[in-house]
Image (cartoon, helix red, strand yellow):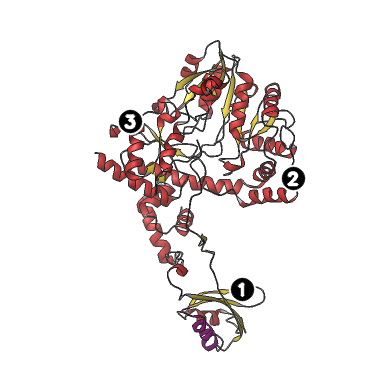
Amino acid sequence: MNLKLLKLLSKNARLKDEELAVMTGAEEKDVHNNIAEMEKEGLIRGYKAVIDWERIDNTHVSALIELKVTPKAGLGFEEVAMKVSQYPEVESVYLMSGGYDLSVTVTGKTFKEVAMFVAKELSTIDSVISTTTHFILRRYKELDVELIGKPSDDRGNFSL
Amino acid sequence: MDYNKLLTPTVLQMKPSGIRKFFDIANTMEDVISLGVGEPDFPTPWQIRKAGITSLEKSQTRYTSNRGLEKLRLEITNYMRRKYQLSYLPEEEVLITVGGSEAIDACIRAVVSPGDEVIIPQPSYVCYEPITQLAGGVPVIIETKAENAFKLTPEELLAAITPRTKVLVLPYPCNPTGAIMEREDLEKIATVLRDKNILVLSDEIYAELTFGGEKHVSIAAIDGMWERTVVVNGFSKTFSMTGWRLGYACGPAPIMAQITKIHQFAIMCAPTTSQYAAIEALRSCDEAVEQMREEYDMRRRLIVHGFNKLGLTCREPKGAFYAFPCIQSTGLTSEEFCEQLLYSKHVAVVPGPAFGQGGEGFVRASYCYSTEHIKEALHRIGEFLNEIK
């Protein structure tokens, strides 16, 4: 049941306990308790809306930063990853396979602000060897949701 | 020109689908929340679309054999065996058609002579009656009952059979009622039919959409029924491929040979691109189908619960993707209910009688919509019910 709940919530976190119960065939109080438990355990980390910020203001700049890092003995990449994660400007931090080590998403108001953040903060961290900044120009799809055009139903009421 | 003298009386008397009439009103309005359409909201799974594209890139754009691509017929026989324990020979017992609709049409035309009777349980899909009439046949309607969960009972069937009966249409899982026929129900129907020279036209287009642990059983899989059954199925509902227009019929060779002639002269062959795409559908889409089915199942629970909570009694549909709530408690006819709901709340559902007079007192609500859409529709229906109290 928990897996079903998580799947439903990952698509639509606004479903109420009652609706989740109906849809999964579970009792409402069990749904409520299980979700509370998963929140407490940290399986569910939060609930957010997927917003197309570009339509709201044009002072929203994001960049993907590739970081090459010297891993520390015993700690690997954990220490630097934790450190990078602390900045409020940082939206996501991933350890990567391939050509670089950490992929960091940074948001800011202007290109310059983001670039300066990388130059002043990220590249000055001890174990960081190099950074490459890629600015995001347009978002087409985020968290499984398409951001282009208005949501529409192109079915034409033609069926019998 | 006197067009009415040109046109046949049969066609002139044929009523356009009651669903269409309703959508025509809905289409003139802004902001309509529809629970009307009988087609999946999911896009065709990508691997199927890609197979279609690839076939175009390879210029596979010629006619296929009249019966359809050999590979596809082979896949269909594998699929029928795997899913429904049915054995057919790809060479002579399978025909690929333009949607399940063409298969129904060709089958009825192959079997029905003027005056022959075709037994049609209703409420059911809208095409059986007019197609029978076009063939000169006489539709014999059985109104299935809500208290029987809209199943066809052997008693009703027996009472409807006459020496002129040629065909029984068996439309399960049923649009619009959501009824299914389980194995024991089919056994009873089979007992009535085994000693008779009547063909069962089993429209199983919703076969993969059954819920609550009930797997679809084909009547052709019941003892003694294979040789008297043509199974019609297709890709529209299962694989979300409505616009590809692809279906098929499987049955005994002596019948299929004749149906194939009709198809050959009327259609030539089903769309080639669609046929190539369909091979991929049957080979690799079990998981995608299962995911869609699970999603439908959750929406089904949501909408059924919603109607019952609003006081519109709605039995649990076991198949297809429609809820069929009873609206008698409102004191309105189905038509009045749908019209008033549409005009006052801009919510479109289809009146039950569009599927036969037995549908009076009910409306059909499709749940091929997102949960948010369904919730909004239920919300508006709730407001409507409060206002007409």
Whichever of callouts 2 and 3 sits on the residue coming sooner in the sequence is: 2
Q: Which residue is mark 1?
A: A96
What is the span of residues highlighted in magenta in the rendered image?
A: A108-122
Q: Is residue B165 left or right of residue B315?
A: right
x and y, in percent, of residue A37 in the image? 40, 62
Provide the chain ID for the residue under circle 3.
B
Both labels 2 and 1 in a single chain = no
Question: Label 2's element?
Answer: loop
Q: Residues within 10 Å of mark 2 (few under 14, many from 20)?
A: some
Q: Which one is nearer the viewer's eye here, B215 or B140?
A: B140
| Screen quadrant of the C terminus of chain B | top left
Mark 1 lies on a secondary structure that is loop
Asked if both marks, 1 and 3, belong to the same chain, the answer given is no
Q: Residues within 10 Å of mark 3 (few under 14, many from 20)?
A: some
Query: Residue A130, located in which quarter of the rendered image?
Result: bottom right
Rendering coords of residue B319 (x, y %): 49, 37
Residue type (three-letter) at the residue carrying disc 2: Gln
Residue B60 is marked as 2
What is the x, y in percent for residue A64? 56, 75
Task: Give the residue furthest to the left.
Answer: B389
Residue B66 can be seen in this image: yes
- On screen, residue B55 versus residue B100, left or right, reads right
Write the residue at 49% across / 15% down: B160
Q: Which quadrant would the N terminus of chain B be assigned to in this image?
A: top right
Q: Is residue B174 left or right of residue B357?
A: right
Q: Amino acid at mark 3?
A: Thr
Q: Quadrant of residue B332?
A: top left
Residue in view at x 68 percent, y 49 percent: B51
Kindly identify which residue carries mark 3.
B333
Q: Residues within 10 Å of mark 1 (few under 14, many from 20)?
A: few
